Each structure stands twice: as C-alpha cells, then as structure tokens.
C-alpha cells in the first residue's frame, strides 16, 4: 500500500537527515582543528520495485557515504620553525602505532616538535618520515625517521682561506726587504683571518702583502709563534708564502706558491691551509683560466679587503632546527653552522577521496586511494612546505549553518510525511467503522 510506503519513505528521510546532521556537527566541531578537511553527506534514492517497472515508486533515501573536501585551508603564521604547512597537494608521512596498528599514516597536520631523542615527531609522538643525509652529503633513497644528533658537533680544521681585496697599484717596494721578524715595517698591506685547528681552537693568521716591483707582489702567511709547535712566543712564524703578477688592467695574471701554508698548532694535527686569492688568467698547473678579477686585484686605489672567509669551525651544540620549502631539515649549531640531516617525504595518492580517516588527524591508504607515492616537497605535483605556519581547517562555518538549516527542514518535512500518512490511515479505519 502506497500509504505505508510513504511512511517508510518518511522514516528513511529521518534516518538520512539525522546522519547528515551528524556530518555537519563533526565539521563544525572541528572548525579549529589544524589540517582538518570537512566532509559532506552523500545521499542516494531507494527504489521499492525492480528497475524499469511501470509502477515503480521510490522508497525513500539513504546516506551512502561521506565525501571529504581536500581543498586548501588557510595558512596561519606561528613563528615556530617546527610548525609545518603544505601549500598544495600531498600529505606528511608519520610512522608509529595508532589504535593497535603499526605503520605509515598520512596527515595535513604539521604540528611537530623535536623529542628527547632528537627525532622530529607530531603531537602524538609519531615520527615524521623522510630521507636521511648520507656521510657524503647526498640523500638516502630509503625512508625513515628524521633525527637530529643532540651530541656536540665536531670541529672542522680549516682547509682553505679566501681573500678578496685590492692592492694599491701606486704602491712601491718598502725601503727594507721582507723581514719575517719585522713584518709590519717590511710590507705594504696586511689582513688578519681566524682559522681553526683539529681541536676546534681558533688561531689568527696574518697575511702580509709586499710590493716587489711593477705589477709584482709577494704575500706571506704568518702565525703566532706561541701557538705553533716548535715556535717561539712573541715571534711570528712564517708558514706560507707566494708571489702574484698582475696585468696592465689590474687583473691577476698569475700566482705561484713558494711555501705552502702548512702548520701544526700546539696539541693539534698538522694541517695544510690553501690560500685562495682568486683565479688568475694564466693559472699554474692544470687549473682552469679565469678573469683574474674574482679575488685579488691591483687598481689605483687604497689597498683594502672587501671579503674574506675560511671553511673551518669550532665545536658547537644543537641550538635549533630549520626546515626549507623542499622539506630539507637542518640542525643549527651554536658555532654558526647549519647541517642538513634529512629531507621530509611527502605522499601523493591517485585518489585522495579513497583515503580512510582513522582519527587523530590521520588517514591511511586503501585500495581505493592507491599506494602512497613518496618524494620531496615541490616535486611531481606535490605542494611546498611553509615552515613556521599551520594549515587551518577548511570548514566554512557560514555554509555549514546554511546546510544545517536545509537538513533541518528536510527532517521536518520527512516527519510531516509520516504524520500525514498516519492521518490517512486513521481516516481509512473510520471508513471501516
């Protein structure tokens, strides 16, 4: 009887709309959940007869599933370097135990921190996955935990110093020839640069430049005698020397090393320190020719240093972390060094809607989503990472309230169908009486 069918159709509407209200309630309650993606109810009609039947009447509605909206949420700046947000497609990969299941899970929630073992984890202690840096500086192809060493960073002895400077083309040779015991009076110009030994101790090296004739200069590298094995306190010790030739345009034509800068500082391992003064036009040995203008030059202006550097450093302790847009995780140390320890892996799926929500802001892969394809952020259509930001929920409260009203009206209408059918049945019973 169609009247009874109407009652059951109305009851199905009550069930479906109740479930839909639950979806909206879940969305609204998670409007401030980081990385949350809102869902919508998917309804389907129910038929009460075989398809194609001439007297087929619908039997109501059912809510078959929920569909997740994976559109981008708004990014909010937090200033915390371990707060991460993905701009674009993809998911962070975390590993651990969730509800008794151990494995990889996927999330847009980038609230992370460094735990007491130095591992980058999320708020539930699940370890973020990525590619660890190998000893040669390249990234491993295997995915695992990203861990920063909390031990002191070992010192690195200086291998090379670099000096960019101009030597005055109007300079003339000093009155007295070069004298290592009186370097200041027997040179035209000097600069000082700190270097490090194998123990991480800093030592000042003085580099003296002496004009020896037209377009000709010598340089001498001096160390403090009290800091050098076999040296004499109060007397500078020459550890290296070379000569420079410039062309008529002030460019470095050629250079030669008479004595390599080799030194053994007290208690440390012997080291040879290369002195890079630029790439000459006519290099010695098999080196590539240069312009002669990228290091020492000889122009008609006062001698002055514009830049100098060296590649050594002393010991340091972990003081912070940096995470780049490509997911490179680097430890920052108290000695000013930044050392890359790994790169975060970002997962991409054939179908995001095939992922199964597990709670705790996590998803897991299913046959409907396809297997996770892992690679670095910014590659293969994956989004970039914004450090110091979090992706907010993409729930639109205004639209949720509009949907809430629509479902409420549909619920009321379905209940009206039941009461109307009931009244008709009562009328029918009165006819029998």
Image (cartoon, rainbow, N blue to C red):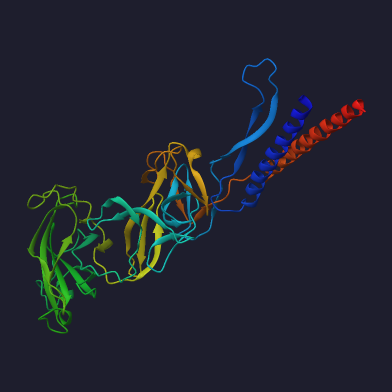
Q: What quarter of the picture does the N terminus occupy?
A: top right
Residue placed farthest to the top in the image? 54
Q: In this view, does 72 lie above or below 209?
A: above
Taking the image as shown, residue 175 lies to the left or right of residue 32, namely left
Residue 77 visible in the picture: yes
Q: Is residue 250 above or below residue 200?
A: above
Q: Is residue 419 above or below residue 268?
A: above
Q: In this view, does 330 lie above or below 415?
A: below
Q: What quarter of the picture does the C terminus occupy?
A: top right
Q: Which residue is drawn at 38% across and 54% down?
A: 129
Q: Residue at x 88, y 29 (%)?
A: 429
Residue placed farthest to the bottom in the image? 233
Q: Which residue is drawn at 17% across and 69% down?
A: 208
Q: Which of 348 and 260 is in front in this view?
A: 348
Q: Which of 136 and 284 is in front in this view?
A: 136
Q: Where is residue 13 in the image (x, y as percent from the top left)?
A: 71, 35
- Rendered image quadrant of residue 56: top right
Q: Residue at x 17, y 84 (%)?
A: 234
Q: Where is residue 320 in the image (x, y as percent from the top left)?
A: 40, 65
Q: Position of residue 213 (x, y in %)?
A: 10, 61
Q: Which of 195 and 284 is in front in this view?
A: 195
Taking the image as shown, residue 161 lies to the left or right of residue 430, namely left
């Amino acid at each position: 009887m169609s009247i009874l069918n109407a009652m059951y159709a109305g009851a199905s509407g009550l069930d479906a709309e109740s479930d839909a209200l639950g979806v909206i309630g879940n969305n609204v309650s998670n409007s401030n959940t980081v990385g949350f993606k809102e869902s919508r109810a998917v309804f389907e009609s129910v038929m009460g007869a075989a398809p194609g039947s001439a007297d087929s009447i619908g039997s109501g509605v059912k809510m078959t599933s929920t569909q997740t909206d994976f559109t981008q949420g708004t990014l909010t700046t937090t200033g915390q370097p371990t707060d991460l947000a993905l701009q674009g497609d993809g998911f962070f990969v975390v590993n651990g135990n969730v509800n008794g299941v151990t494995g990889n899970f996927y999330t847009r929630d980038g609230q992370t921190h460094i735990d007491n073992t130095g591992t980058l984890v999320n708020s539930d202690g699940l370890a973020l996955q990525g590619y660890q840096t190998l000893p040669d500086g390249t990234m491993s192809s295997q995915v695992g935990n990203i861990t920063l060493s909390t031990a002191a960073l070992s010192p690195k002895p200086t291998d090379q110093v670099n000096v960019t400077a101009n030597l005055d083309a109007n300079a003339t040779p000093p009155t007295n020839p070069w004298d290592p015991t009186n370097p200041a009076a027997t040179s035209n110009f000097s600069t000082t640069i700190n270097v490090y030994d194998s123990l991480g101790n800093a030592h000042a090296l003085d580099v003296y430049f002496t004009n020896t004739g037209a377009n000709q200069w010598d340089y001498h590298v001096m160390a403090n005698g009290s800091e050098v094995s076999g040296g004499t306190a109060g007397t500078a010790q020459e550890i290296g020397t070379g000569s420079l030739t410039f062309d008529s345009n002030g460019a470095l034509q050629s250079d030669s090393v008479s004595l390599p800068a080799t030194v053994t500082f007290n208690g440390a391992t012997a080291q040879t320190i290369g002195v890079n003064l630029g790439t000459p036009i006519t290099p010695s040995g098999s080196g590539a020719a240069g312009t002669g203008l990228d290091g020492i030059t000889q122009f008609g202006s006062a001698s002055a240093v514009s830049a100098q550097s060296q590649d050594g450093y002393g010991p340091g302790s972990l003081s912070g972390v940096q995470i780049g847009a490509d997911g490179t995780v680097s430890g920052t140390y108290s000695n000013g060094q930044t050392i890359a320890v790994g790169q975060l892996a970002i997962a991409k799926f054939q179908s995001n809607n095939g992922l199964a929500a597990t709670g705790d802001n996590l998803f897991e892969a299913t046959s409907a989503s396809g297997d996770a394809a892992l690679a670095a952020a910014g590659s293969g259509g994956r989004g970039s990472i914004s450090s110091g930001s979090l992706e907010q929920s993409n729930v639109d409260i205004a639209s949720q309230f509009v949907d809430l009203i629509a479902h409420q009206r549909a619920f009321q209408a379905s209940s009206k169908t039941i009461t109307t059918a009931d009244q008709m049945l009562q009328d029918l019973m009165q006819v029998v009486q």
